[in-house]
Amino acid sequence: MARKPKTASSPHTRAGDSSISTIRIIGGRLRGQTIQYSGDTRTRPMKDRVREAVFNLVGPAIKNRLVIDLFAGTGAIGLEALSRGAEQAILIEQHFPTVRLIEENVTSLKLNGQVEVIGTDTFYWVEHRMSNHQALTDSNPWVVFCSPPYLFYTERWNDMEQLIQTVCRLAPPQSLLVLETDEHLDLASLPWSDQWDIRTSPPAVLGILTIQEDLK
């Protein structure tokens, strides 16, 4: 059975205006810099306190790693990871206006050489493109963030389960898979449910899985 959730939270605020909203990078060398996003509900940004909780849990494991931000939305998780010491980031987002805005943010933060933004469906990319992506042929561990719309955990659970299994099969041992969900997901239904470190940071539930060879 899945481990009992523990509580982890750190409050922050988010700035914005009536047209273009902004999110702050909350840690690392780019702390205080802002990321613009359209406010479109399809890009549901992770709340600041949840993002802080994620990076408190991942800790120094982010340093010099390749980060993959699935369902990137605003791109805040991938860009925050780079601020905190990640080496490279791949951001996957299917909403093309949002992809363009992420690319503008990458340029404004002077991260062009460290970020690849891919405009495509995440499920398709994981199943058909992830295995032969040139940047992923290195055997060094990755950190994979998976923060989809919460409804995917109910309405598209079969797709989510397949995605989790595929990432675990392809990722080098000692990679981390960081999942954001909410209370509607039955944690016992997760693949390898007893191996997740589960924490709560309302309204989110966070799960971190260290990918071992025996999961493949």
Image (tube, helix red, strand yellow):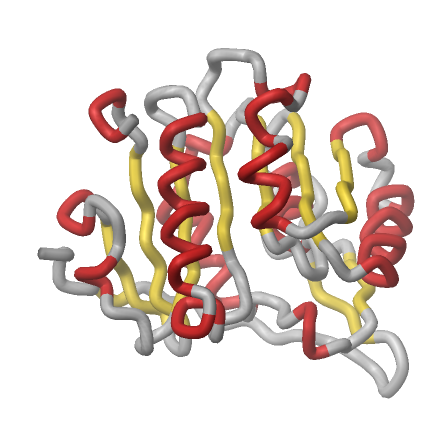
The residue lying at 77 percent from left, 61 percent from top is 95
Q: Give the residue furthest to the bottom.
A: 18
Task: Answer left or right for 193 relative to 141.
Answer: left
Q: Quadrant of the N terminus?
A: bottom left
Percent of width and height locating residue 184: 32, 77
40 on left or right of 144: right
- State whether residue 34 is above or below residue 80: below
Q: Position of residue 49 (x, y in %)?
A: 48, 67
Residue at 43% from the left image edge and 26% from the top image edge: 171
Q: If the image is split into quadrants, where does the C terminus sit?
A: top left
At 36% from the left and 48% from the top, the residue drawn is 57
Q: Is residue 78 left or right of residue 119?
A: left
Residue 3 lies in what quarter of the image?
bottom left
Q: Is residue 101 left or right of residue 11?
A: right
Looking at this view, is 110 or 154 the one in front? 154
Estimate the x, y position of residue 149 in percent, counting from the top left: 54, 69
Give the answer, above or below, for where 173 lies relative to 30: above
Coordinates of residue 54 in the picture (x, y in percent): 43, 53
Q: Residue at x 38, y 76 (%)?
A: 202
